[in-house]
Amino acid sequence: MAGDGMAQLLEQTSIFTLAWSASTAANLPSRTLPLAEDVALLCVSGAQHGDIDRVEKLLSKGIPVDTRDSAGYTALHYAARAGHTGMCERLISVGAGVNATTRSGSATPLHRAAAAGRLQVVKLLLRSGADASSIDADGKNALHRAVSGGHIEVAEALSKVEPALKDIVDKRGNLPLHYAGSNMELVELLK
């Protein structure tokens, strides 16, 4: 498929360009930093890949910790989804918003970590004040997202912190239990 080859080439080019831009911008003096959207990409890219040094350099140049990309994701959203606990700890320690929501989906870092099954990050976010009952644009809380992904330990951790999450109905009229499917361990947990 010619279209698939072109898409792959474009993706590889984007990754190369972003990596080059990130390494270059992290070493630029503050007065020559790139445009805000580029800075957001550099910061979230560093967070997504667990590159604490890159993110530290950007933060030291005055880049706000909650800088957002075009979809409204912060570095903490990306680090949480990728499971970079150390990066999440650092971002939170310098004031990253644990309840920051994306623009269109209203997802928090907790939603992202739960959906990806990142137990240690979920626990960190909860200890740091993340609102377990926050719902996204689909009306789903972090428990819905964890159960949809089949992440039993994450679902258990969320249920212990906020037992009422089991009773929240999303915009489709589904409880977290409805997303458990045939996973009997999740079904038992959510009864």
Image: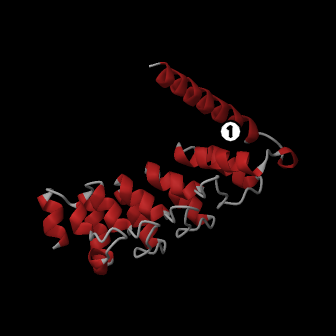
Give whichever of 107, 40 is nearer the camera: 107
Q: Is residue 165 above or below residue 5?
A: below
Direction top: furthest residue: 2
| Label 1 residue SS | helix
Residue 97 appears at what percent x and percent y?
58, 68
Q: Is residue 4 above or below residue 166?
A: above
Q: Is residue 108 above or below residue 21?
A: below
Relative placement, left or right, of 2 versus 73 is: left
Residue 22 appears at what percent x and percent y?
68, 38
Residue 85 appears at what percent x and percent y?
46, 55
Direction right: furthest residue: 31
Give whichever of 134, 2 is nearer the camera: 2
Colour basis? secondary structure
Image quadrant for the C terminus? bottom left
User: Residue drawn at (69%, 35%), measured in percent from left and top?
Assistant: 23
Direction bottom: furthest residue: 164
Relative placement, left or right, of 187 versus 20 is: left
Give whichever of 150, 84 is nearer the camera: 150
Pointer 1: what residue?
Answer: 22
User: Residue drawn at (80%, 41%), measured in percent from left and top?
Assistant: 28
Residues packed near mark 1 inside 10 Å, few (<14), some (14 to 19) or many (20 plus): many
User: Residue drawn at (58%, 56%), measured in percent from left and top?
Assistant: 73
